[in-house]
Image (cartoon, rainbow, N blue to C red):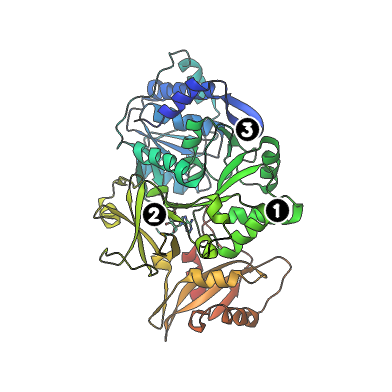
Amino acid sequence: MNLANWLHHTGLVRPDAPALRRGEVLHATYSTFAQRSCAVGDCLRSRFGIRRGDRVALFAKNSAEYLEVLYGALWIGAIIVPINHKLHPREAAWIIGNAEARLVFTDDGRIFTSLSDVVADCREIGLFTEELVGGLGASSRTTYSAPVAVEDDEVAWLFYTSGTTGRPKGVMTTHKNLRMMATSYALDVDTVSCRDHVLYAAPMSHGAGLYNFQFVRAGACHVIPDSQGFDAAEIEKLARALGSLVFFAAPTMIMRLLKHAQSSGYRGEGIRTIVYGGGPMYLADINNALDLFGPRFAQIYGQGESPMTITAMPRDIVADAEHPRAEQRRASVGTAQSCVEVRVVDQAMNERPVGEVGEVVVRGDTVMKGYWQNEAATAETLVEGWLKTGDLGSMDEDGFLTLTDRSKDVIISGGTNIYPREVEEALLTNEKVFEVSVVGSPHPEWGEEVVAFVVLNEGTACSTEELDAWCKTQIASFKKPKRYIFVPELPKNSYGKVLKTSLREQARA
Ligand code: AMP
């Protein structure tokens, strides 16, 4: 089934419901949204010769038009290739070339003029230029037809991994994968209603955009902030004005929202749910978030290879203070989502006992079809029907999964495994510490030594001795950092993920 059927359905059932807003201003109702997407599809087919299975890239900031083009491409069975707009055009060009995209939509249609050699055979079109808008004017006179039928295992979204190491890989995500992701959201993460306002504060090319589908089906209103990105004061304003605001945010964004709350006195009025994920949320930080905003947080753990759907923890469990292991649960990433099985295994794929660390593997309806034109990587990652996530974690007796680290981030010092996450959690309980990231660095005697990069809270001072004494009260002595490096900020990629590779280089230097 074509996922665009959901928009077609809502356009017919709730034609007058507000569908797309720019800030508080209405841009389209559901009938207009559906008709424009159908017209985009028509235009892609008739003007640009796009056929079912062709790749159409989107390298643009969040906008209402982004969603219209995304659905327009799906409408005719084309494959969308959303690319993070924060990437360098050269990085985007590499992805466009790898995906062999026929078209790339950009904001103004003029990004790739000097790169035509890199993106040969690909045409660039501005989302807001006459080339598309004019085409739409011509196409909208054609009849409004249902999306083309596609098979469940046809690729809908070619998702390029964020590539914290090496070149990104194209994850083939099918119509069924995304349908199951969206359906599981309603069962495992949070309720979805036509009264919701879903806000795009994070790039649509990643989690925030993936999560549009369930809200289209429910007839909720999609809100694109005027800033087209994350601005805490703007979120407060929109939440107060619109109400029932829901959005996906990486933990670093939540930290910025909490900073704003601390200085402005805002306590989350108008926000219904913030779904966090995409990187570790430390216990000290989520506790702080709950203190300030109350039970408004749900967590998901996923990766491009099983988009947004490995485990989840709904609001009531995140906020639960009664369960004997409430804090342990809150520090976890929750339990397996309803359409997947999740296990923790050893290298031979045997299940590890409760409480013991191993690699997290996933099997089920959201697991990708494979990597785009990369059979070797696919064979390494999909083993015996299971997706090897490369994440390490342990399962408790109730099925709550606690992530320790990516397997490549584990530090082996004196023959013992040290999980950076544990050291980071310990340091973050110190009130002077704002952010921290722990890595291993080569050491002649121990193999590797533990190095902590620390960002202090504004206006505070702290010595190495003080942090060392603090760690002594929190964790075993062999896990304590041997070096502390104070930095003004941590290096992060365009999705806000800490670049441990770059920290390892700095530690070595
Ligand atoms: P990506 O494919 O870019 O979405 O990155 C996925 C990776 O982000 C996962 O394999 C995890 O290492 C990490 N990640 C995602 N969600 C969480 C979470 N809730 N807690 C900790 N790490 C996470």
Name which residue lies at 60% across and 53% down: 253
Q: What amino acid type should be assigned to the residue bearing mark 3? A: Arg
Q: CA distance from mark 3 to mark 1?
A: 23 Å
The residue that mark 2 highlights is 167
- Residue 37 visible, this orientation: no
Label 3 environment density (alpha carbons within 10 Å; few <14, some 14–19, many ≥20): some
From the top left corner, tell me how far across and down residue 99 is, in percent. Answer: 36, 42
Label 1 environment density (alpha carbons within 10 Å; few <14, some 14–19, many ≥20): some
Q: Earlier in the sequence, mark 2 or mark 1?
A: 2
Picture disc at residue 260: 1
Q: Earlier in the sequence, mark 3 or mark 2?
A: 3
Q: What amino acid type should be assigned to the residue bearing mark 2? A: Arg
Label 2 environment density (alpha carbons within 10 Å; few <14, some 14–19, many ≥20): few
Q: Earlier in the sequence, mark 3 or mark 1?
A: 3
| Picture layout, residue 478 above or below residue 84 | below
Q: What amino acid type should be assigned to the residue bearing mark 1? A: His
Query: Quick one: 296 or 417, which is closer to the camera?
Result: 296
Kindly indicate whether the residue at mark 1 contacts the one at mark 2 (C-beta within 8 angstroms): no
Determine whether the residue tagged by mark 2 lies in a helix, strand or loop: loop
Determine whether the residue tagged by mark 1 lies in a helix, strand or loop: helix
Name which residue lies at 48% across and 65% down: 500
The residue that mark 3 highlights is 22
From the top left corner, tell me how far across and down residue 302 is, in percent. Answer: 43, 52
From the top left corner, tell me how far across and down residue 460 is, in percent. Answer: 72, 70
Q: Quadrant of ligand 1?
A: bottom left
Q: CA distance from mark 3 to mark 2?
A: 34 Å
Q: Residue furthest bottom?
A: 445
Determine whether the residue tagged by mark 3 lies in a helix, strand or loop: strand
Of marks 3 and 2, the one in the foreground = 3
Q: CA distance from mark 2 to mark 1?
A: 35 Å
Question: Residue 291 occupies which quadrant of the picture?
Answer: bottom right
Q: Residue furthest left?
A: 384
